[in-house]
Image: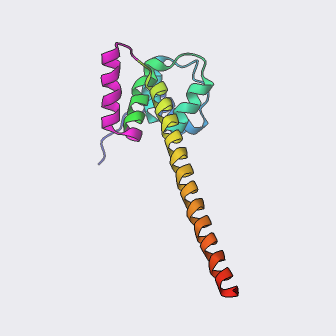
Amino acid sequence: MEPERKPLSLLELCFRSAVDNLRYMNSVDNLEMGLLKRILPHCTLEQLTHIESCTEMDLTGVTDVLWKRFFQREFGEADMNVAIKRMKESGVRYKWKKLFEEKTEKQKQVEQRMSAGLRNKYEAANAGTQYAGINLVCMKLF
């Protein structure tokens, strides 16, 4: 025979419902910080970004740890340690969300430069083979 289970509290039911429906969540201005500390760690990067953009109050107290974790996952332990070291050396503490956004933007710029360089090399190589092909056609004609 199964032992009797204790029914879930209304708060626990609300918590589970919130976590199950994070993709539909917008502003969390009216929720208390204790509840947000339980709910927001279940967010994906996109969900957290959306919730923060819809919320007027500052969520840094709850989300800074989450952004640090996203930074570590996206860029690695070494880059995270470099960021921490630089903050300690400069005596300035930055929000991890801002560090994540800036690092992402820097990475996009590097990728754009690399793809432009590859495109230029491909176009130059392609132009050279086309020019060589034209020379072969001309030689055959004369």
Q: Can the viewer see residue 4? A: yes
Left or right of residue 118, residue 73 in this image: left
Highlighted range, magenta: 73-93
Quadrant of the rendered image containing residue 83: top left
Residue 66 vs 107, above or below: the answer is: above
Q: Residue at x 42, y 35 (%)?
A: 70
Seen as rendered, the residue at the extreme top is 91
Q: Can the viewer see residue 12? A: no
Left or right of residue 15, residue 3 in this image: left
| Position of residue 95 measured from the top left corner of the image (x, y, whole percent) | 44, 21
Q: Residue at x 35, y 34 (%)?
A: 79
Q: Nearer the viewer, residue 51 or 126?
A: 126
| Position of residue 75 measured from the top left corner of the image (x, y, whole percent) | 39, 39
Seen as rendered, the residue at the extreme right is 141
Q: Residue at x 70, y 86 (%)?
A: 141
Q: Examine the residues drawn in magenta and state their main secondary structure.
A: helix
Residue 66 on the magenta span: no
Q: Residue at x 57, y 50 (%)?
A: 116
| Position of residue 61 measured from the top left corner of the image (x, y, whole percent) | 44, 17
